[in-house]
Image (cartoon, rainbow, N blue to C red):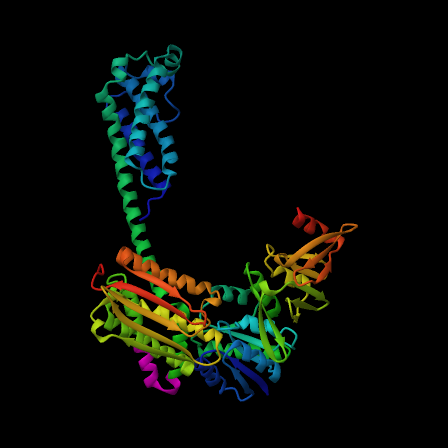
Amino acid sequence: MRISRASAYGVFAALFVGAVIYLSWHGHGSVSLWPPPGPTMLRRSAPGLSKELTLLTWWAWLLALLAMPVFWRLSRPPSSRTLSILLGAFVLVGALVSLVTSDLATARWLGAVQLPWAVTLDPRRIALEAVPFIVVALVVHLLRARDAENALRAQAAESRLQALTAQLQPHFLFNTLQAISTALNRDPMVADRMVAGLAALLRSALDGSKSPVVGLDRELELLAAYVGIMRERFGDRVSVSVDVDPSLVTATVPVLVLQPLVENAFRHAVEAREGAASISVKGRRNGAHLVLTVSDDGPGAASGDSARGTGLANTSERLAALYRGNAALEVSSPIGGGMTVELRIPLGQARA
Amino acid sequence: MIRVVIVDDEGPSRERVRGLLTRHPGIEIVGEADDGSSAVERISELGPDLVFLDVQMPGLSGFEVLEALADEVPPAVVFVTAYDEYAIQAFDRHAVDYLLKPIVPARFEQAVERALERLAGRPASDPDVRKLIEERMIGRPGPRRFAARVGGKIRLIADDLVEWIEGAGNYVRLHTATERFPIRAAIKDLERTLDSARFARIHRSAIVRLTAIHTVEPAGDGEYLVVLRSGARIRSSRRYGPVLRGLIR
């Protein structure tokens, strides 16, 4: 449930009214809620200090009530600072009201007698009057904190979704579904294979937020699933070769780190040439690092491609989040054309 | 017989459209293309009645294909797209028919029916493909490129190679340092698709790229002579004098 400003205001007003009725019922003199107690009404009520205190409470609550929406306009839950400001304002208003009522003319208008300072500023009285106010403020604070937590949770879900679309683009998903529906009519076995491959990719992308790294062997299986789908979609316009040192398959890498790089390379390379785009993925060891490279035979850096830049930036961010400064992404493009993206990932150091 | 061309860079996607069309004996598939450039060639050489046109293709997009074909008799077009929310909004706005991948047979039938009605001269609604293309270009500030047909081939010309653009009625001529390319478009429509920070209209029939300007000489009476780096000399008209005065200042 979201606590709107209006409903918090309503709860506060109800408590306020309740407090006033309670106070007026329990020997603090009878005070009507509206219009504010005039001279005749007060004169009729029992004499004594409690009457003035009731009045004071009435005005203080009214002013605090009017002040609340101003504070709640700040849409975050009230901080302890806000709460202490409110409390201070409450005490100050009480003191001010007592000052005003100590003025003879005003006191006469209100039908009150001059207030002795000692009573008005009695800390016990003020504390007592502040209790319901503090309770309400705390309840509102807790409810709002819960709201904030829910919002955070929603945000986490959204970033998971963003990670998914960064790794598996909607364009890829829908084109693959189109290819599957074609295959259903021609060769159900092919359709079966594509569904299995797509399911593996989707599952890994969705699980990515829980287990952000996988073994390189699993990553290569996912790459194979992806390449299998590409082959169905583009036939012989794409060829992907994979060459990874077998001793490295136990290394861990961010899940689906290779797939967007291969997708980028393909899009980039196929755009520029009539024939097949060939992409090569290599993995080797370099000291304490696993070095993965994805190269294409496209036109290289000569053609600016902002989509490619975005894809690489995503990969860079993932590496930074997982390995701090221990991983790196480098792009190189020789003059003759082609482009190579190189990932350096520390061996066996991933934060799981 | 309705003659159809299918354009998509993915084989299975073309096969899907082909398969769904077999139920229509009155429709004949006369050609297919697997990228934008060959689509332009195919469509202009075959002159089909109806084209199923993929939007996102490497090289030339579906929109650029139609732009390059602007001086042909336009075929009816059904766009096919995997995912592009902006394109879909534009399709809806201009009553242009489109299919989402994966293509659903019922929706496909509907699209074919609408296309047939349109071809029979009973427009169900009035699609405005030209406006759609123009809007796609205007919608993107910054650099753009032009698709020009040169002897059956499509040349893509990045706008920073274009020195100036000469208007000639329904056509414009793009002038690069060494070449000229005719494109079917009115200069005032083209002007709106250009990056106004880099291009300026200086005459009813001339737009120049600002960084291509070498010198600007006052020619009296509020007119100026603009000399480009390539040596081309263009006289501005008085109406656009403020633009040039702004450049000199």
Residue in the foreground of this view, choosing between A108 and A304: A304
Q: Quadrant of residue B73?
A: bottom right
Q: Quadrant of residue A192?
A: bottom left
- The mark total stands at 0
Q: Residue at x 35, y 27 (%)?
A: A33
Residue in the foreground of this view, choosing between B87 and B11: B11
Question: Please, what is the dominant secondary structure of the magenta stretch?
Answer: helix
Q: Is residue A1 left or right of residue B130?
A: left
- In which quadrant is the C terminus of chain A drawn? bottom left
Q: Is residue B72 left or right of residue A85?
A: right
Residue B202 position, x and y percent, is 70, 56
Examine the rendered structure and indicate whether residue A72 appears above or below residue B83: above
Q: Which residues are magenta?
A: A184-197
Residue in the foreground of this view, choosing between A57 and B73: B73
Q: Residue at x 36, y 13 (%)?
A: A107
Residue extending furthest toward the right: B221
Residue A103 position, x and y percent, is 37, 12
Residue A243 in magenta? no
Q: Residue at x 63, y 77 (%)?
A: B150
Q: Is residue A226 visible?
A: yes
Examine the rendered structure and indicate whether residue A177 appears above or below residue B197: below
Residue A34 position, x and y percent, is 38, 26
Examine the rendered structure and indicate whether residue A115 appears above or below residue B216: above
Residue B99 position, x and y percent, is 49, 74
Residue in the foreground of this view, choosing between A138 and A158: A158
Q: Is residue B124 visible?
A: no
Examine the rendered structure and indicate whether residue B169 appears above or below residue A81: below
